[in-house]
Image (cartoon, rainbow, N blue to C red):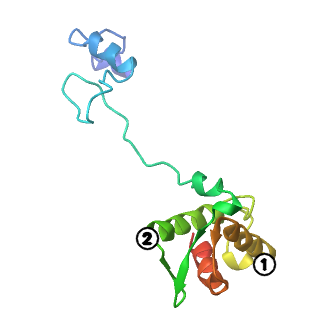
């Protein structure tokens, strides 16, 4: 009743200025050129933003025991042999710490994680990298931070 009194029409009427061609382009995959360099022009629809995705380190998780890479430590910090190996180790430890087969969501604190689980993560890290005995404290710190 209110709408009729104030002259508001609620019936669906097609807008005469509505461009059906643009709408069809958007429904067919954003109307964008797959060879486009990411810039949007006036006659194309919107594009989804690209994002990095989840870090899985599948290459490292799939390595064999014989293909392990050695990591050297100096004063408790990894130094190489290359920065790539050190960064791979850090990324790998982050994925191990978030792996539900090692740590479930039951634990809200690293201190609540049983020692056996921590030891299993240390053994698994040693299966993928050659780590010196003195590096266990650093590895556990990185697992805690992840």
What percent of the width, then of the height, locates residue 76? Answer: 55, 87
What percent of the width, then of the height, locates residue 26? Answer: 34, 20
Q: Is residue 116 left or right of residue 92?
A: right
- Front disc: 1 or 2: 2
Q: Is residue 142 left or right of residue 126?
A: left
Q: Residue at x 23, y 32 (%)?
A: 40
Which quarter of the rendered picture does the C terminus lie within?
A: bottom right
Where on the picture, by quarter, is residue 35? top left
Looking at the rendered structure, the secondary structure element under dot 2 is helix
Where on the picture, by quarter, is residue 94? bottom right
The outermost residue toward the right is: 116
Where on the picture, by quarter, is residue 127? bottom right
Q: How many marks?
A: 2
Q: Nearer the viewer, residue 41 or 92?
A: 92
Where 141 falls versus 85 (above or below)?
A: below
Q: Pointer 1: residues within 10 angstroms few (<14), some, or many (20+)?
A: few
What percent of the width, then of the height, locates residue 3? Answer: 34, 20
The tag earlier along the polypeptide, 1 or 2, is 2
Q: Residue at x 39, y 22 (%)?
A: 29
Q: Nearer the viewer, residue 11 or 26?
A: 26
What percent of the width, then of the height, locates residue 86? Answer: 50, 71
Where 104 falls versus 113 (above or below)?
A: above
Where 135 falls versus 121 (above or below)?
A: below
Q: Residue at x 52, y 64 (%)?
A: 88
Instruction: Quickly name the residue at label 2.
Output: 83
Instruction: Quickly name the residue at label 1.
Output: 115
């Amino acid at each position: 009743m209110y709408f009729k009194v104030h002259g508001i029409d609620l019936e669906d009427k097609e807008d005469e200025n509505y461009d059906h061609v643009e709408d069809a382009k958007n429904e067919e995959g954003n109307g964008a050129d797959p060879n486009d360099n990411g810039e949007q022009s006036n006659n194309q629809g919107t594009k989804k933003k690209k994002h990095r995705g989840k870090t899985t380190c599948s290459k490292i998780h799939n390595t064999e025991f014989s293909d392990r890479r050695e990591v050297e430590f100096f004063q408790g910090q990894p130094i190489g042999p290359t920065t790539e190996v050190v960064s791979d180790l850090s990324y790998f430890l982050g994925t191990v710490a978030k792996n539900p087969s090692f740590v479930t969501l039951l634990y809200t604190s690293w201190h609540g994680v049983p020692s056996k689980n921590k030891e299993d993560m240390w053994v698994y890290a040693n299966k993928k990298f050659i780590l010196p005995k003195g590096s266990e404290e650093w590895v556990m710190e990185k697992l805690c931070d992840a």
